[in-house]
Image: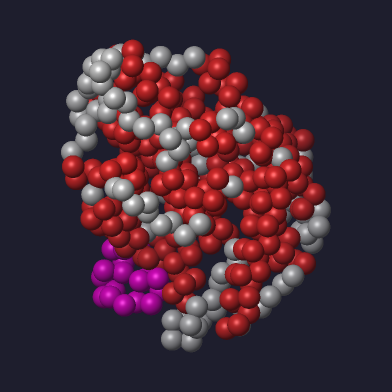
Amino acid sequence: MGNSGPLTESQEQPQTKRLVCVDALRGLAVVGILAVHVPHDAPGGWRQNPWFFPSFGMDFGHIGVPLFVMISGFCIHLATAKHRRNSGDWHVRWCEFWTRRIYRLYPPYIAAIVFSLCMAATSHDRYSMVEDFSLKDLFAHLLLIHNLTDNYSLGLGNGVFWSLGMEEQLYGLYFLLLVALRTFNYPTAVVLPLLASLLWRLYSPGFTDNSDAFAFWPFSYWAFWILGAIAADHFIENIKLPEWCTSIQWSIFCLTCGICLSSHTVDQITRARITSDVRIEWLKLNSSGLSALSELGFCFGFFFLLNFLIKREQTEQTQLCFFGLPTMGRLSYSIYLTHFPVMHSLEYLLPIYPTTLGWLLRIVSYTGISLIVGVVFYCTVERHFLSKAAAGKSVI
């Protein structure tokens, strides 16, 4: 990866229109989150239940969160990358940066907290994500530090709020990344924090004893964020990545490795005992290491996919068909904020037993209602805090 100098007057900058593929990836991410949170248990094995494999696939919807994080790294770093391309320095007006981010994200977040508490009141197990609702819980959420604790990371009746705290803390780590970019050459500045994030994911207690207080810390997702920033620099032509970094074949390979090495796959293999006892014991003993390698596969798989789609959109004359995902991407924040308490309440108010027909009915109805609520939330709350850029006049 090599740095290039500032633009001369005769050089063209990359297009700054809104990238449809980025919205499509946002849509794909929120589809994954909906899939993992909708009750999708299919009792019985693959021989007894026709929905066993779809249910197994939906377990991987959690990777929508790191995909969101990578897109965030791309979009947040994009303005800085453009400034670097034009002026030659890594400069950010931090007061304006934080003002924009707080205005864009915080009011819908507060509205979602109110909404979640109201929805929790309709459930038979109020505030089920913590033992008792407390002002400490609320205060931690308002300060966006709740994800750093075991007690409050999944509190206020909406388990997805942990990622909002993590995202804001990644903005803080962005300052360290820019300091590194000013101090070292580009490869060193991005590779060192990238390795630090991967080592944290491999060795932190959160991935060996399932402690949310460590697994939900921003260091666990910093690698995804940094790779998104690298993709932005490549798009703006501050750096030139090797051709294989835009390869769909490498993306498929890495994502396949991520699936095969994941804890969900390992659990199915050990439960079904489809290999020898010696291999099963080895898988059990090395499950945490395999899980870290799985996340590494998803990390680079999404990176290659993002680069491939951007290159394809910029160079191909025909527009890629994303089947409505870009629209979902533009609504993704509202859907993400509201879907969990909606689904949790529907389990209590509209219970559907997962028979063959019931499984499909539950997936369609719960997901459909969650999407409707997300659209209503967008129209009544989020759209009032969109900047002109977010309305469609820029890449993000």
Image-based side of 390 in relation to 262, left or right: right
Q: Is residue 216 visible?
A: yes
Magenta span includes 242: no
Give the percent coordinates (x, y) of residue 3: 22, 22
Q: Is residue 148 visible?
A: no
Tell me which segment is drawn in magenta: 268-288
Give the percent coordinates (x, y) of residue 268: 40, 71
The vertical placement of 102 against 326, above or below, is above
Most foreground residue, 233 or 191: 233
Most foreground residue, 282 or 89: 89
Image-based side of 88 in relation to 72, left or right: left
Residue at 34% across, 52% down: 318
Give the percent coordinates (x, y) of residue 375: 66, 51
The vertical placement of 347 against 370, above or below, is below
Magenta span includes 269: yes
Residue 241, quarter of the rendered image: top left
Image-based side of 348 in relation to 174, left or right: right
